[in-house]
């Protein structure tokens, strides 16, 4: 490494800090009123397909959902929304409550009370080959933003963030992308294939005379 190459300084600890996602969610919850004002159907992105009658308690849950969604610039999955309901103490943590919230969100979207573009399903996507009708210039205009230089080249170590639950990837996705740190969802546990792939990355790091720090994030709801 030349003298002109900038080197980032990092403070190393014996154990990586454990990020308390639940505490962070509860801190955000203080900004949400217990009885928020009704927002729909004035919210943009709402479309009504089914007429429905809601109890007052259900309407309040829908407005809690809209208040939580409004705090994020990206779309949430249903499970991400559920975890934030639990972290804020709005509903208990159980499969029954998750199913009830899923049903309520579905009814709220179809009734024009929750915007359609705020909840996404990351498990069911249309797949296929992307085609370009006009010219090679159209292709180049779309891929120019995919080019990124590796800021970790020449560093003494590389970092990876592993998170236990796939539904919480959105919590770390933005900050990891901003700092060019790869992130990985264990989806409850690390499979043999994922563990082997990680071992190959570690071996490559040894060849490159650097080390990989794995920052793990675990979330517990009580």
Image (tube, rainbow, N blue to C red):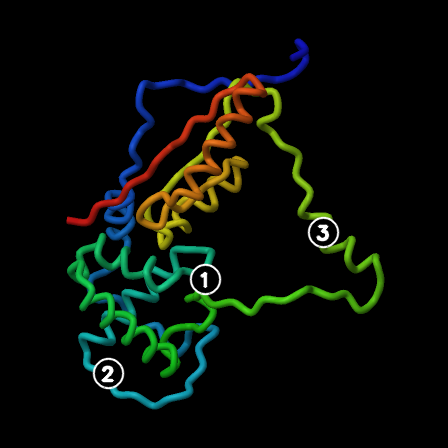
Toward the top, the furthest residue is 3
| Residue 142, image x, y percentages | 72, 55
Q: Name the residue under label 2.
A: 54
Nearer the observer, 33 or 134: 134
Observer-side mark, 2 or 3, equals: 3
Q: Which residue is drawn at 31% across and 29% down?
A: 17
Callout in the foreground (2, 1): 1
Pointer 1 residue: 122
At 23% across and 60% down in the image, what residue appears?
33
Question: According to the image, label 3 marks what residue?
Answer: 143
Which sits in the foreground, 203 or 114? 203
Q: Is residue 175 left or right of residue 136?
A: left
Q: Quadrant of the N terminus?
A: top right
Q: How far apart are marks 3 and 1 (CA)?
A: 23 Å
Alpha carbon distance from label 2 to label 3? 46 Å
- At 24% from the left and 83% from the top, the residue drawn is 54
Q: Which mark is residue 159?
A: none
| Res 8 visible | no
Q: Where is residue 191 in the image (x, y as percent from the top left)?
A: 38, 45
Check disc 1: other Cα within 10 Å, few if <14, some if 14-19, many if 20+.
few
Numbered disc total: 3
């Amino acid at each position: 490494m030349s003298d002109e190459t900038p080197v980032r300084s990092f403070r190393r600890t014996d154990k990586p800090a454990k990020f308390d996602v639940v505490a962070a969610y509860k801190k955000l919850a203080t900004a949400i009123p217990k009885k928020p004002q009704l927002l729909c159907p004035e919210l943009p992105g709402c479309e009504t397909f089914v007429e429905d009658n809601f109890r007052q308690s259900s309407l309040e849950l829908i407005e809690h959902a809209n208040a939580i969604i409004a705090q994020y610039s990206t779309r949430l999955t249903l499970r991400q929304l559920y975890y934030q309901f639990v972290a804020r103490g709005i509903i208990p943590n159980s499969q029954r409550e998750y199913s009830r919230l899923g049903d309520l969100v579905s009814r709220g979207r179809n009734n024009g009370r929750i915007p359609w573009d705020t909840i996404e399903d990351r498990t069911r996507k249309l797949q296929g080959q992307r085609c370009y009708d006009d010219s090679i210039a159209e292709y180049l205009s779309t891929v120019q933003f995919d080019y990124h230089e590796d800021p970790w080249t020449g560093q003494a170590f590389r970092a990876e963030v592993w998170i236990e639950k796939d539904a919480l990837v959105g919590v770390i996705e933005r900050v990891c992308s901003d700092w060019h740190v790869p992130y990985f969802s264990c989806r409850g546990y690390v499979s043999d294939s994922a563990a082997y792939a990680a071992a190959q990355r570690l071996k490559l790091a040894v060849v490159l005379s650097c080390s990989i720090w794995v920052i793990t994030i675990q979330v517990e709801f009580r």
